[in-house]
């Protein structure tokens, strides 16, 4: 066995109020592909940021080639040969492709250290061609599709001749063929001695590439196994902390009459011809890969952005929704993906947050009915079992899961009958996750219609009555629960192979 | 992956080189005024417009750097005044007036000569004062995390105040200036005024800097995506400071030219000038949100405003009413900005269409 290139022991990172990493260990051999798995919020992203010098750990040690190193900033990490492809594209939209690739390590010439644009463009073209892409290096980044931008990100990491390459969800936006090509590139890199840390939600990626896998859950290290010695079920159990059967509640609500119907909804450049129907008591899953247009559909539905074509029917009546306020008046409430930014006023109390969208219901003449507000706030808090000392606690003091419940309470107080939940369990701890699922089933039973946007396949498959799968801005198929499997949902979500 | 189109349709050319659109606007404006007053289109007048615009253009070049990193500087008029005033006071202190007689047209005439410190030293002083102001702005914004508009608004008051202090309330007039300083904005080379040469020098230098040097490209990176720049290890704060120092130094230079051109340096010199400069940048296609903007666009933006200003005078539409002139000027600037926004929106739509969803 050769010596480890990278070894991490006892790394802990604390953000105000949250332990993002708790005593995590990891090791990597030269020429090894080591997968890092875990649910959203398990600490994978923080782990990368610690390793690339963006964050400094509070405890713990990083050894490279057996020597302790301090990644005090990203340049130090780069000098140690660590390069990362981030999950959220770290692109400069206004600059050219070539410049995106070489920003930070420009190709210079002469005593004046002039940027050699000719060489930059040429090398960028070669790098992209080695990835099987014909993107022009002088094209501006913002005109590229998400998949193309992802390729540029990969070229960017390759351009640094990294010894340790971190790939955070590299295939998330790629088609099957593009993924296969990427696997081939990664294998080639490995054969040249590059070590790869692979982070992916797709088990497929892990099984076809990785030698070993390390699992994180709730910021903690769970274990490391050789990939061919661990089954799919075992992996899920390690990642989720319990088996799937125990995890998802049994939904008893019957699917009733249709309440919301979309007909050919389109927004130029984002999605086209989206049609589906949402029924009373139904949980309708809306899924797809990054950039498939799920969030954009919902934003248009709620009147946050304009649509270029199509109609929305509510109880068989065509409606015009110009703003989220209109939507709420019609009984459509949104639980946004980023609850801290879009869903809550963090410095406000739980009670004030709950009644904010429905203040019209709490009027006494021209004054506010403060006590009525408190009663409603208290009622929702108890209904949803928000863990807090009282409704006067600030929203900021709650955990992710309990914050999510407050946002749900907000929607219920607003008398919404149609709930749109955008990634309702993202960044929520496992215990609260199960509770949120129970609340969803409960609400469905009370006759609420729920549209759940989610990228987590187990959640989509186990919670939805029907699954709308989007691909490249269009609805690729609608799968009923009985027929849904990981495979057919994923296949429907994968981009069709396009000719380059 | 999109196949590259074989032939570029006209609108994509217009989108790629949107400066062409601006050139058309300028040409239209010039033609319009020319119809009413043919004197306007005389080469000498057109050259005069460029000369008249050069100070604004120099400032706009600096403003480009600041806007690129996502910042703004509204203290530039004050910085111009302070730089000019400090230089003026130094010049006044070292002033020597000598009288000689010379034969002019066969008549013996008394000639008064004003000399002071050498011009290179004076220019250095002016630029240094501006650069220091820019440094303070940049440091407060980058390291103090104070909003740029607040920082530079405060700076504007401070520098105008300092201007009053250093001059003891005494403006610097022609008789206290060295002849070299007065000539600074007046001499010609190859029939072209020095201000135009200086402007061209500044633009070429900056063009090279932001095209071929990594520090220059970092201006774009920081304004385009701060987070990505940070993850890449680009010195974000230093880049912001650098942008403000460039702006300050150019404001210092512009202040000297302004003082020389007016042959007087007052405590309220150039007040309100920053708005023209920012407008020039916006018309030139610089995004106030940072990360995007071309130096050629800035030059054209400044020229557009120059043509509007000069054209309004030449059209004599408004009699001598300064108020009307200002109002029409404002409206035209607004029209230029709005049409630019519309072009940008069309461009965005075209990009979306190309995604082919």
Image: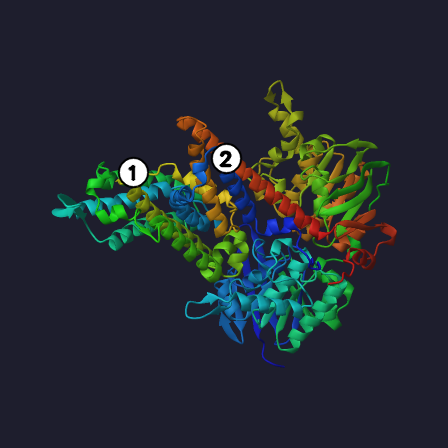
Report how many numbered discs are placed on residues in the image: 2
Relative to B294, is A382 above or below?
above
Dot 1 falls on which chain?
Answer: B
For marks 2 and 1 on the same chain, the one whose residue lies earlier in the sequence:
2
Residue A345 in the image: x percent, y percent?
58, 38
Quarter of the rendering containing residue A392: top right
Element at label 1: helix
What's the mark number on residue B161?
A: 1
Residue B139 in the image: x percent, y percent?
39, 50
In the visual, does A162 lie left or right of A171? Answer: left
Foreground residue, A66 or B49? B49
In the visual, does A423 lie left or right of A70? Answer: right
Q: CA distance from mark 2 to mark 1?
A: 46 Å
Element at label 2: helix
Foreground residue, A186 or A336? A186
Q: Residues within 10 Å of mark 1 (few under 14, many from 20)?
A: some
Q: Which residue is mark 2?
A: B35
- Circles 2 and 1: CB atoms closer than 8 Å: no
Same-subunit check for callouts 2 and 1 = yes
At 57% from the left edge and 43% from the top edge, which residue is drawn?
A397
Q: Residue furthest top?
A: A365
Residue A439 in the image: x percent, y percent?
74, 42
In the visual, does A418 lie left or right of A69? Answer: right
Dot 2 falls on which chain?
Answer: B
Relative to A29, is B25 above or below?
above
């Amino acid at each position: 066995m050769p010596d480890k290139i990278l070894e991490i022991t006892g790394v802990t990172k604390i953000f105000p109020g949250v332990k993002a990493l708790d005593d995590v260990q990891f090791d990597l051999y030269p020429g090894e592909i080591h997968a890092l798995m875990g649910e959203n919020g398990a600490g994978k992203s923080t782990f990368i940021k610690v390793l690339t010098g963006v964050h400094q750990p509070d405890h713990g040690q990083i050894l490279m080639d057996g020597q302790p190193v301090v990644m005090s900033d990203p340049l130090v990490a780069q000098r140690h040969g660590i390069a990362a492809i981030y999950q959220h594209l770290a692109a400069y939209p206004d600059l050219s492709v070539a410049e995106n690739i070489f920003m930070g390590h420009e190709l210079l010439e002469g005593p004046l250290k002039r940027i050699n644009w000719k060489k930059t463009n040429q090398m960028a073209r070669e790098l992209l061609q080695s990835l099987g892409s014909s993107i022009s290096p002088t094209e501006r980044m913002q005109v590229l599709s998400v998949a193309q931008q992802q390729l540029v990100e990969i070229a960017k990491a390759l351009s640094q001749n990294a010894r340790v390459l971190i790939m955070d969800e590299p295939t998330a936006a790629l088609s099957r063929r593009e993924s296969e090509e990427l696997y081939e590139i990664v294998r080639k890199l490995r054969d040249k001695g590059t070590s790869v840390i692979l982070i992916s939600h797709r088990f497929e990626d892990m099984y076809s590439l990785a030698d070993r896998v390390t699992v994180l859950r709730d910021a903690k290290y769970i274990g490391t196994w050789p990939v061919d010695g661990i089954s799919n079920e075992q992996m899920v159990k390690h990642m989720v902390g319990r088996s799937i059967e125990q995890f998802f509640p049994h939904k008893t609500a019957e699917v009733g009459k249709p309440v919301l119907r979309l007909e050919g909804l389109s927004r130029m450049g984002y999605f086209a011809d989206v049609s589906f129907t949402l029924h009373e008591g139904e949980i309708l899953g809306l899924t797809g890969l990054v950039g498939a247009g799920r969030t954009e559909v919902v934003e248009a539905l709620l009147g946050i952005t304009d649509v270029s074509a199509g109609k929305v029917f509510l109880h068989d009546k065509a409606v015009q929704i110009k703003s989220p306020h209109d939507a709420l008046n019609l009984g459509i409430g949104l639980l946004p993906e980023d609850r801290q930014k879009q869903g809550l006023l963090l410095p406000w109390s739980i009670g004030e947050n709950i009644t904010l969208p429905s203040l019209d219901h709490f009027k006494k003449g021209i004054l506010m009915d403060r006590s009525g507000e408190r009663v409603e706030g208290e009622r929702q808090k108890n209904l949803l079992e928000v863990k807090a000392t009282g409704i006067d606690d600030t929203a900021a003091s709650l955990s992710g899961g309990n914050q999510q419940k407050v946002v749900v309470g907000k929607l219920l107080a607003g008398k919404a009958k149609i709930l749109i939940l955008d990634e309702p369990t993202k960044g929520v701890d496992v215990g609260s996750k199960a509770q949120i699922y129970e609340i969803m089933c409960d609400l469905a039973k009370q006759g609420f219609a729920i549209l759940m946007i989610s990228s987590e396949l187990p959640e989509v498959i186990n919670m939805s009555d029907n699954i709308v799968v989007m691909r490249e801005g269009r609805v690729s198929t609608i799968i009923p629960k009985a027929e849904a499997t990981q495979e057919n949902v994923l296949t429907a979500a994968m981009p069709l192979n396009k000719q380059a | 992956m999109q196949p590259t189109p074989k032939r570029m349709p006209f609108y994509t050319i217009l989108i790629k080189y949107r400066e062409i659109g601006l050139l058309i606007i300028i040409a239209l404006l010039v033609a319009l005024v020319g119809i009413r007053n043919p004197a306007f289109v005389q080469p000498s007048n057109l050259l005069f417009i460029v000369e008249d615009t050069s100070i604004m253009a120099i400032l706009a070049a600096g403003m480009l750097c600041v806007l690129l990193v996502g910042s703004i500087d509204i203290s530039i008029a004050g910085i111009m005044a302070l730089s000019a005033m400090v230089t003026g006071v130094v010049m006044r202190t070292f002033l020597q007036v000598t009288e000689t007689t010379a034969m002019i047209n066969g008549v013996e005439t008394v000639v008064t000569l004003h000399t002071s410190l050498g011009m290179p030293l004076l220019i250095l002083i002016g630029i240094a004062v501006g650069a220091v102001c820019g440094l303070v702005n940049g440091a407060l914004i980058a390291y103090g995390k104070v909003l740029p508009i607040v920082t530079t608004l405060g700076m504007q008051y401070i520098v105008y105040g300092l201007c009053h202090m250093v001059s003891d309330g005494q403006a610097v007039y022609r008789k206290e200036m060295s002849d070299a300083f007065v000539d600074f904005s007046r001499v010609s080379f190859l029939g072209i005024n020095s201000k135009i040469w200086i402007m061209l020098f500044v633009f070429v230098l900056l063009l090279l800097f932001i095209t071929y040097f990594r520090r220059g490209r970092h201006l774009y990176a920081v304004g385009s995506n701060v987070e990505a720049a940070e993850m890449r290890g680009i010195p974000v704060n230093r880049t912001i400071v650098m942008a403000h120092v460039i702006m300050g130094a150019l404001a210092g230079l512009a202040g000297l030219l302004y003082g020389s051109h007016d042959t007087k340096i007052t405590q309220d010199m150039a007040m309100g000038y920053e708005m023209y400069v920012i407008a020039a940048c916006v018309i030139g296609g610089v995004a106030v949100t940072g990360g995007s903007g071309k130096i050629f666009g800035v030059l054209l933006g400044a020229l557009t405003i120059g043509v509007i200003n000069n054209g309004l005078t030449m059209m004599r539409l408004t009699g001598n009413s300064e108020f009307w002139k200002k109002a029409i000027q404002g409206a035209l600037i607004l029209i230029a900005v709005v049409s630019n926004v519309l072009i940008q929106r069309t461009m965005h739509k075209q990009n979306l269409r190309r995604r082919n969803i």
